Amino acid sequence: MVYTASAMDRLPVQRNARLAVTAALAALGIWILWDFIPALLWATIFAVATWPLYRAFARPEPAKGESLMAPLAFTLIVGFLFLVPIALMALELGRETLLLARVIPDITKNGLPVPEFLADIPRVGPLAAHWWQTNLADPQGAQELLGRLDRGVLIDWTRTLGQQLARRSTVLIFTLLTLFFLYRHGARLVLDLEALVVRLVGPQGRRVGTQMVHAIRGTVNGLVLVGLGEGAVLAVAYVALGLPHAALFGGATAVLAMIPFGAPLVFGLAALVLLSQNGVVAAIILLSVGAVVVFVADHFVRPVLIGGSAKLPFLWVLLGILGGLEGFGLVGLFLGPAIMAALLTLWREWVAASRETTVDA
């Protein structure tokens, strides 16, 4: 094909116009989908993390990518595994809030006695006992400290919590809906994305995408599964040591254990509750068990699951988790390591190419 001078002059103009229209459409699409981006991201993370399990689950069905039963059933299974724990924790939290609303008026009226053990704690014990006597044991001090936490405030807080739960439930519904379509058309979508990535950035794009997938799966295993394991082990310890509301503390431990350094906050609070009941030995045992569980999980199990899957040093895994959490919220826990894995893959390929060029020269 022979291009005239005027036709060749029009080619850059057409290319620039096409790029401008594409960018404008992409911006409009992001603007339209902005409120649904968290649901889309969560669905993508769930799909990537559970894809091997789904393929094994759907294997008896014809691999046409258009069946309904396998993706629908597996989506319901995933939703059940996440919906039931969230619903139970929400009900328990609401029940605890109502109990707190009944207890606070009694504390402000009669005061809360100082625990006998508190003054015996070295160094800080006498100061803590004096503060407790002034602000909690004395009804007037308790009234000043807890006066704002009346029933109306707690009801307002409960209402706000209900609104947040409703909003999160909406995100969860759209997440499950998106997840269903990802399961149903995932195989074809992966082929389309591979073709697009190879066309845009070349063969290395496929390798980068593979590393990101491994990083997401490793992070899900290292954060979610290990967090659930920590919560289960410490829940047994809570029950054995006689901690009140052990199930609630166990669920909170499992959730916060997914975040680095989150589990010690929960079992530290649980130890304080045991101390308030004169359970000094039980509190020491709980702190010791919690420290051992967190040490083993964070220094041995998680580095193998996350770093081993993505071939990513644990320092970069930790930086990716914390930086992703800071930049993107909870979804950043999984996006951060994936981005770090992609950057490290590009770096390794660039270094390898530079060495080959130096040797050839």
Image: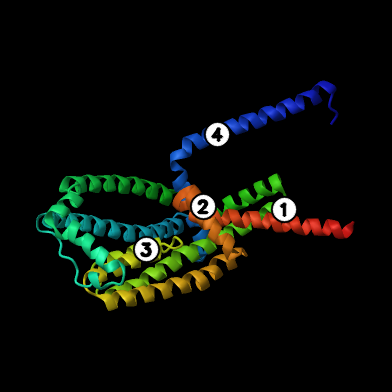
Q: Which class describes the residues within 10 Å of circle 3: few (<14), some (14-19), or many (20+)?
A: some
Dot 1 falls on a residue whose secondary structure is: loop
Left or right, 118 with respect to 56, comes to left
Residue at 9% of width from left, 55% of height from top?
109
Name the residue that disc number 1 marks. Answer: 203
Circle nearer the viewer, 1 or 3: 3
- Amino acid under label 4? Ala
Left or right, 123 with respect to 330, comes to left
Name the residue that disc number 4 marks. Answer: 27
Name the residue that disc number 2 marks. Answer: 324
Residue 167 percent location from the top left of the image: 34, 45
Name the residue that disc number 3 marks. Answer: 265
- Amino acid under label 3? Leu
The foreground one among 87 and 77 is 87
Among the two numbered marks 2 and 3 on one chain, the one whose residue lies closer to the N terminus: 3
Dot 3 falls on a residue whose secondary structure is: helix
Dot 4 falls on a residue whose secondary structure is: helix
Is the residue under label 2 in contact with that under label 4 (CB below 8 Å)? no
Left or right, 193 with respect to 29, comes to right
Residue 20 percent location from the top left of the image: 64, 29
